[in-house]
């Protein structure tokens, strides 16, 4: 394989992997605060892209993307308040079924609003004819927007959890909801914030990738599977590892095109997921992930969901 072609696969994989990483981090943000695995996370990317496409007809592109991010974050909070917040210590299986149902609900609502056509935002800079040469590989300028946006979100989220009062409150709720409540923290508000952050991050990534991959109502399911693969590969609750796992999954997926028909590209993520679940279900960073699972198990099923 020529070097330029190998580099093309590598850069394409890193671009896709950056998006998968954001989905995986979205899984972890909610899981860390609530113990819930939210299988509607992929729909937030789809929803953010479609809302931005609609608003772009009325607003400048930066404002449309910002408004879509906030609107999708608000939608995540509404879904939590309507379908999850009122539950009292629900079983993990029940929460999985609920979030899968929410995924279907959001997808069908998007189908009725936007139809089954493929939509796309304009390129943030340049257009589809402009490209940048990197050691013989050709890249769209939008690739740099996608990777830069993903890197910025990962760094900002890390700083948020480490240095801000709200971030520390979310970490405290993840450690012990009961102790956090005794310290004056309202777990219900923290959980709502986690849904807002996960949805908003997904929406921003969905808007950034829309000019490259285009946006359709049914794209969320595939992204959810790949994002969940990244979250499991890195160890549930470990966002930094999920980001690295996203890049790994993206590169492996892109590289598979050189050896397999393109129709089998999505099989790569499923194969990785099944292999992890069979061989190392605690993820690559076992100690930290295992501790989080033990804490969640000791606090009861779906312990992060506050009782009303």
Image (cartoon, rainbow, N blue to C red):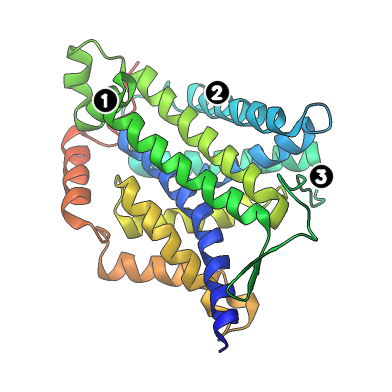
Which residue is at a point 23% across and 10% down the rendered structure image?
Answer: 184
Q: Quadrant of residue 277?
A: bottom left
Which residue is at a point 21% across and 19% down the rendered structure image?
Answer: 180
Q: Residues within 10 Å of mark 3 (few under 14, many from 20)?
A: few
In percent of width and height, residue 229 lies at: 42, 59
Q: Which mark is residue 115?
A: 3
Vertical relation: 167 (above or below) 226: above
Q: Say whether residue 134 is left or right of residue 114.
A: left
Q: Which mark is residue 78?
A: 2
Vertical relation: 147 (above or below) 40: below
Front-most of 300 and 65?
65
Instruction: In the displayed orientation, state which residue is furthest to the top.
Output: 184
**Earlier residue among tags 1 and 2:** 2
Residue 34 seen anywhere in this rendered image of the structure: no
Q: Residues within 10 Å of mark 1 (few under 14, many from 20)?
A: some
Q: Which mark is residue 291?
A: none
Dots 1 and 2: beta carbons under 8 Å? no
Q: Which mark is residue 168?
A: 1
**Earlier residue among tags 2 and 3:** 2
Q: For numbered disc 2, what is the local secondary structure?
A: helix
Q: For numbered disc 3, what is the local secondary structure?
A: loop
């Amino acid at each position: 394989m020529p070097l330029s072609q190998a580099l093309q696969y590598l850069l394409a994989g890193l671009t896709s992997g950056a998006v998968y990483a954001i989905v995986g981090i979205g899984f972890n943000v909610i899981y860390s605060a609530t113990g819930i695995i939210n299988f509607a996370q992929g729909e937030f990317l789809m929803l953010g892209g479609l809302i931005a496409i609609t608003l772009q007809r009325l607003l400048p592109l930066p404002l449309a993307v910002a408004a879509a991010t906030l609107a999708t974050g608000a939608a995540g909070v509404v879904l939590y308040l309507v379908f999850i917040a009122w539950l009292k210590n629900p079983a993990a299986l029940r929460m999985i079924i609920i979030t899968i149902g929410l995924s279907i609900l959001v997808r069908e609502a998007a189908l009725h609003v936007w139809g089954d056509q493929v939509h796309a935002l304009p390129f943030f800079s340049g257009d589809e004819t402009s490209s940048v040469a990197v050691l013989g590989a050709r890249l769209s300028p939008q690739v740099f927007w996608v990777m830069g946006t993903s890197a910025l979100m990962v760094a900002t989220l890390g700083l948020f959890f480490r240095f801000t009062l709200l971030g520390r409150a979310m970490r405290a709720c993840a450690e012990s909801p009961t102790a956090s409540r005794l310290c004056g923290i309202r777990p219900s508000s923290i959980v709502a914030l986690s849904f807002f952050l996960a949805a908003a991050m997904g929406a921003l990534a969905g808007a950034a990738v829309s000019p490259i991959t285009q946006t359709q109502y049914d794209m969320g399911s595939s992204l959810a599977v790949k994002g969940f693969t990244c979250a499991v590969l890195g160890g549930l609750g470990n966002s930094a590892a999920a980001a690295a796992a996203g890049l790994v999954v993206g590169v492996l997926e892109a590289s598979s095109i050189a050896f397999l028909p393109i129709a089998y590209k999505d099989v790569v993520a499923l194969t990785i997921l099944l292999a992890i679940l069979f061989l190392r279900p605690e993820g690559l960073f076992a100690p930290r992930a295992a501790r989080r699972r033990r804490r969640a198990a000791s606090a009861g099923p779906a312990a992060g969901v506050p009782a009303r």
